[in-house]
Amino acid sequence: MEPEYVEFAEVDGMWVRAYTLEKRHHVAAQHAHEHDHITLLASGSVAFWRNGEQVSQHKAPAVITVPAGSKHAFVALSDNVVLCCLHNLRGTGETAPKALDEVS
């Protein structure tokens, strides 16, 4: 099941999207971005996947660094996971982070 996007904000070049994974095993689909960014795990626990491999598990609160160009996904290990993706767009000329691709 896809995440539910609950909030979006952009302030002074910092782009933030908060979303929830309501149930254990729900997945935020694999995708990649042009720039490094961080994901703040605000609630719950997740498995972090990068380039098709699980690389770590995290329990809130946690800050997860996602390198540019890496395909990444999050799998909920608990109910009611809240994640916030933070992208610094200052100086890029972009109004939202570019997803390089969408993988099912």
Image: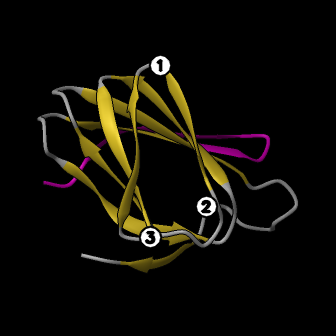
- Which kind of residue does numbered mark 1 sit on? Pro
Mark 2 Cα-neighbour bin, 10 Å: few <14, some 14–19, many ≥20: some
Mark 1 and mark 2 residues within 8 Å of each other at the beta carbon: no
Magenta range is 1-16
| Separation of residues labelled 3 and 2 (CA atoms) | 22 Å
Give the number of the mark in front: 1 or 3: 3
Q: Which mark is residue 96?
A: 2
Mark before the other along the chain sequence, 1 or 2 = 1
Q: Quadrant of residue 57?
A: top left
Residue, x 44% and y 70% (percent of image)? Answer: 51
Residue, x 41% and y 35% (percent of image)? Answer: 83
Answer with left or right where residue 37 lies relative to residue 24. Answer: right
Q: Residue 62: horizontal and vertical position, in percent? A: 51, 26
Answer with left or right where residue 79 lies relative to residue 89. Answer: left
Q: Quadrant of the N terminus?
A: bottom left
| Separation of residues labelled 1 and 2 (CA atoms) | 25 Å
Q: Quadrant of the C terminus?
A: bottom left
Q: Residue 52: horizontal and vertical position, in percent? A: 36, 70
Name the outermost residue toward the right: 91
- Which kind of residue does numbered mark 3 sit on? Asn
Q: Which residue is mark 3?
A: 51
Q: Which mark is residue 61?
A: 1
Mark before the other along the chain sequence, 3 or 2 = 3
